[in-house]
Image (tube, rainbow, N blue to C red):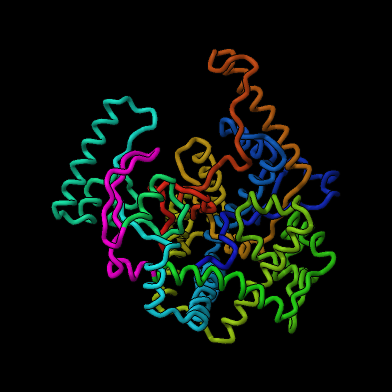
Amino acid sequence: MRRLLIVAGLLGVAGCSNFRDMFSAHADVAATAGDLSLPTARLGQILAGPKGAQLNREASEYVANLWTDYALFAQAVARHKLPTDSATIAEALWPQVAEMRSAHWWDTLLARRTHMTPAAADSVYNGNDVRLFQHILLRVDPNAVPEERAAARKKADGFLAKVKSGTDFGTLASQVSEDPGSARDQGFLEAAPRGKWVTAFDSAGWTLAPGAVSGIVETPFGYHIIKRPAASVVHDRLMAWINQGAGVRLDSVYLDSLGLARKVKVASDAPATIRSAVLDMDAYANSKKTITSYQGGQVTVHDFLPWVRQIPPQYIQQLKTVPDSQLVQFARGVTNSVLLLKQADSAKIGLTPDEWTQLRQSYTGQIDSLRMEMGLSGPDVSDSSTAESERLKVAGLKLEAYFDALLAGKSRLRPIPPTLAVMLRSRMPHRLYEAGIARGLEQGRATRAKADSARAAAGEIPPGTLPPGMTPGAVRPAPGSAPNPGAPTTQSAPNTPAPRK
């Protein structure tokens, strides 16, 4: 099932306060969050800390927003106001809930609109357009010396002899193939049209009769033994491939038809509105200005921004500069997702009890891990008998200690669920100051220059050499986000199959 919703990002990045702050009395403060403040000196220290980090306006804003979200989180813990009830958790998990509900509805649509019989797999198998192979690969570097190549060929010949003597192909592939992806699945590759694999592999595979095994096939990746499994062996795999393709076709056709049926119209000033809202999402959070309209309703800025907050920060930055035509398409895509969820509502599509339990456990586990990482799990913050003012002081100290540990590489940045960060911002006072962010950047540059001069004097770096650059947000979140799959190439190596759904 293709993901229908915008992928979840790491943190919602809010904009800064307005221009008059450049001339305000807050030049020594970059941000405030509840009872805590981020002095410009501290911002400069954080910016200058990671070696190789770029010191620019985007990085300064990123860190100020990062600090704001974690400061609000720490104070919510100290005040015992961290959202923990079911309704609030459901709100905080809105992206995941929406994703799962739309997936269930999509599966229902797919079942209704695709009537694939078992004969469909037989038709594909007996045709000449698509093949599903197993293979065993012995890797050989293209620059291998003749002796290495000969040794690999000898091993391949030995394995081919075993196959011909009756050894089960899948079992042998699992044991000896040097293609990790297919070896985990008995040597099976994905079903693919002719031309998908490199030429030598493709040509050899397409000559095989059902159930036949090739000789040794040499490609730039090494030596292969290829099998075309019998129809009965790959029937279920071919049905899955057919249904996946039907889902992709339904995706494009159905969503387009949904937009047409509901007469989706993008407002003429939508691109300008989106750019303004992205620049200052906090200020526009409750805006009722229309982005798109459709038969029976509209998508306002207030409705639109939760979708924006779910995409990675680097793509949010791109929304500020892409052409109007791309913003129009983005607005249509969001509206189609909104309409799809409305259909799921009408069909009373929900989560199963097990799904909700898993989501809730995942959320509480993420929050508990973050509290522990920040040192916010102890009684000095959680004990109700301690005065709230004292708990808040401790929370502020823990926050700064956490950032110190991040800068020292002694701790990992565990992301706050983006929708929770938005909820905390909506419930607690916070503000960013243009002048303070600019001054913090200046102080960070000065600190970095002084440190670089000291390192150069000590001979650690050549004079005049700058550390390698990094993207804004050099304090990186812990690993674990979903990978970004690349588009399939016209011709692929048989040892790099796409993930099987």
| Residue 92 visible in rendering | no
Q: Nearer the viewer, residue 391 or 339?
A: 339
Q: Quadrant of residue 309?
A: bottom right
- Location of residue 352 with respect to 443 vertically, above or below: below
Name which quarter of the figure residue 435 lies in.
top right
Rendering coords of residue 227 (x, y %): 29, 55
Residue 48 point in image, percent of width and height: 62, 32
**Residue 53 visible in the snapshot:** yes
Magenta-colored span? 209-238
How far from the left and from the top, in percent, is residue 430? 69, 56
Task: Between residue 490 and residue 443, name the one nearer to us.
Answer: 490
Q: Residue at x 55, y 44 (%)?
A: 400
Q: Is residue 285 left or right of residue 255?
A: right
Residue shown at 42% from the left, 74% from the top: 355
* Residue nearest the viewer, comparing 489 with 318: 489
Q: Is residue 227 magenta?
A: yes
Image spot of residue 417 (x, y percent)? 54, 60
Q: Quadrant of the C terminus?
A: bottom left
